[in-house]
């Protein structure tokens, strides 16, 4: 590794950790120039403090969707401030990585190793961008839907550019329905998912831990009501069923006609009920951070 390259990495490490030149140089030497391992090395030594860049909260940023030949990928890249999320260099970085994500089927470990236009890999460019912009930036999560026997759709909410915004949705439908009719419904359903934020397609897809947590909250809420146990059990079951309806796509109220559920709309469009929701992905910037 050339001396100029070492100095550049030391500079980047100093920007990220706030640690002095000597300790950064030592960390780079000890970890063969790997910035991420050097950050970890300094933290283990107790030199890099937890309040430095890499430990700050990055809950702003952008969702980006890329598509080709009925294949779609979605990725979330975070920054600390919305100001940086609007920075042209950050936007270009997100767009290029989004295109890489599509070629790598949304597999994060492969995305990070892939070379970008400047011949450096994603991981190296991420570190360089953190150093230049002065904020923590993270490539948080990615997903992918392929083209096998399904029709796929996407939707981006609060888009700053096409397929680049604060909420992104991917949707896969399996149907023999007329393509034009299915396309109208698919786009509407993707918008519904963005607005209604379902957790799963139906009850079977709900995480058991989420249901247990909700039961716990409902039980605690009803504990001091003074009602008989039998009545409390009925109320608890009712509340849990309401939670399931509110959070499962097929049982949610259709945003365009709230008196009907999504499954009712599917039945109206195709009485034989041949429209099957195979998968959906919904990313909202910073959600759960």
Image (tube, rainbow, N blue to C red):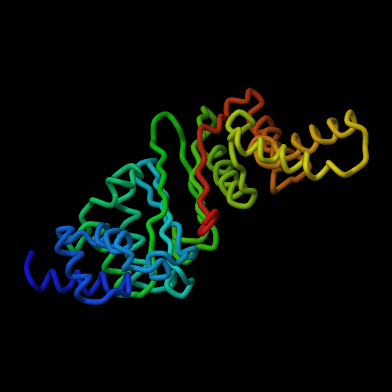
Asked which quadrant contains residue 266, the reply is: top right
Could you say which is closer to the camera, residue 118 or residue 212? 212
| Whole-percent x, y for residue 228 in the image | 92, 33
Could you say which is closer to the camera, residue 88 or residue 38? 38
Work out which residue is located at the far top of the displayed protein and give it. 272
Residue pictured at 26% horizontal, 69% vertical? 13
Asked which quadrant contains residue 198, the reply is: top right
Viewed as shown, does residue 45 lie left or right of 59?
left
Residue pictured at 45% horizontal, 62% vertical? 62
Could you say which is closer to the camera, residue 141 or residue 164? 141
Visible residue check, residue 126: no
Looking at the rendered structure, the number of numbered marks drawn on it comes to 0
Residue pictured at 50% horizontal, 44% vertical? 281
Compared with 277, 79 (above or below) is below
Residue pictured at 58% horizontal, 51% vertical? 194
| Whole-percent x, y for residue 256 in the image | 70, 48
| Whole-percent x, y for residue 61 in the image | 45, 64
Visible residue check, residue 66: yes
Viewed as shown, does residue 113 lie left or right of 179?
left
Work out which residue is located at the far left of the displayed protein and give it. 2
Compared with 31, 200 (above or below) is above
- On-image quarter of the N terminus: bottom left
């Amino acid at each position: 590794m050339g001396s100029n390259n070492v100095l550049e990495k030391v500079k980047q490490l100093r920007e990220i950790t706030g640690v002095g030149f000597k300790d950064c140089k030592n960390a780079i030497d000890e970890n063969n120039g790997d910035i991420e391992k050097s950050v970890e090395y300094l933290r283990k030594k107790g030199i890099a403090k937890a309040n430095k860049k890499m430990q700050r909260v990055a809950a702003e940023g952008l969702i980006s969707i890329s598509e080709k030949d009925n294949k779609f990928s979605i990725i979330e890249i975070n920054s600390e401030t919305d100001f940086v999320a609007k920075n042209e260099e950050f936007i270009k970085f997100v767009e290029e990585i989004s295109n890489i994500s599509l070629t790598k089927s949304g597999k994060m470990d492969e995305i990070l190793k892939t070379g970008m236009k400047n011949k450096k890999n994603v991981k190296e460019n991420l570190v360089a961008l953190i150093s230049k912009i002065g904020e923590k930036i993270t490539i948080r999560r990615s997903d992918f839907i392929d083209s096998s026997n399904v029709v796929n759709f996407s939707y981006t909410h609060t888009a700053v550019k096409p397929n680049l915004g604060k909420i992104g949705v991917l949707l896969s439908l399996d149907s023999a329905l007329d393509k034009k009719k299915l396309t109208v419904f698919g786009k509407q359903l993707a918008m519904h998912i963005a607005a209604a934020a379902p957790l799963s397609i139906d009850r079977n897809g709900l995480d058991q831990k989420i249901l247990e947590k909700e039961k716990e909250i409902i039980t605690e809420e009803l504990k001091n009501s003074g009602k008989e146990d039998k009545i409390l059990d009925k109320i608890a079951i009712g509340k849990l069923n309401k939670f399931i309806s509110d959070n499962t796509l097929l049982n949610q109220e259709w945003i365009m006609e709230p008196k009907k559920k999504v499954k009712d709309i599917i039945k109206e469009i195709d009485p034989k009920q041949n429209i099957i929701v195979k998968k959906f992905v919904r990313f909202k910037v910073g959600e759960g951070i």
